[in-house]
Image (tube, helix red, strand yellow):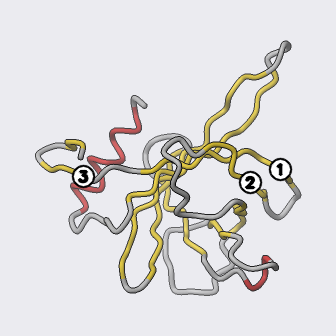
Amino acid sequence: MEATGKNKTPDFYRHVYRICNKVKSYTTYELAELPKGLNFLSDFLRIEPYQGKSQTKGVSICSRLRTTSNWTTSKDVTGLRPTDIKGVYYGDRLRNDIKTLLIFRFMEKKNGLFGESEIRLNIDVYPHYYPRHKEILQNIINTYKTN
């Protein structure tokens, strides 16, 4: 557990994704690294505009996990809520009535001999944990200012 303010938060499990397909209406990412070896998400996911199919407010983009053989039937979707940190969003995943906090961080990484940039997506999963108070959530988000 890690201290965030006066509170301790559970360890997170980072999932590192790289872009494998980009079109006008969405971007598909493929799992590239799993530092702790446990996959809580899926090997592929899509970031797409929020389609307004729920009553969620304050969300303009969402993440869709590839949980079936067809993107349309993959129902595991979460809205990405913006934070005051550039490229950092948060969301949740609800399974069996238990919420899990997800922190999304889009990062530009320089690669290759010529320093081409590549966008990576880190998703930190806090299994079976979602803060009950906004202050705790904000403290967790604030740790991404320096990471």
Q: Residue at x 31, y 48 (%)?
A: 140
Q: Amino acid at mark 3?
A: Thr
Q: How much space separates mark 2 and mark 3, taking CA atoms?
A: 28 Å
Callout 1 touching callout 2 (CB < 8 Å): yes
Residue 54 at x, y = what percent? 57, 86
**Mark-to-mark CA distance, 1 and 3:** 32 Å
Q: Nearer the viewer, residue 51 or 75?
A: 75
The answer to whether 86 appears left or right of 69 in the picture is left
Q: Which residue is mark 1?
A: 20
What's the residue type where badge 1 is placed? Cys
Disc 2 marks which residue?
Answer: 29
* 10 vs 147, nearest the viewer: 10
Residue at 67 percent of width and 32 percent of height: 108
- The answer to whether marks 2 and 3 mark residues whose Cβ atoms lie closer than 8 Å is no
| Residue closer to the observer: 43 or 23 | 43
* Amino acid of disc 2: Tyr
Q: Residues within 10 Å of mark 2 (few under 14, many from 20)?
A: many
| Residue ID at (77%, 47%) | 19
Q: For the point 49% across and 61% down, which residue is it?
A: 81
As drawn, is 80 to the left or to the right of 140?
A: right
Q: Secondary structure at mark 1?
A: strand
* Lower position in the chain sequence, tag 1 or tag 3: 3
Q: In the displayed image of the protein, which residue is found farthest to the front?
A: 37
**Quadrant of the rendered image containing residue 87:** top right
Numbered mark located on residue 28 in the image: none
Q: Is residue 91 above or below residue 38?
A: below
Query: Marks 1 and 2, Cα distance to the nearest angstrom?
Result: 5 Å
Residue 103 as seen in the image, left or right of residue 98? right
Q: Position of residue 12 (x, y in %)?
A: 39, 50
Q: In the image as oriented, which residue stretches furthest toward the top? A: 113
Q: Which mark is residue 9?
A: 3
Q: Are marks 1 and 3 in contact (CB under 8 Å)?
A: no
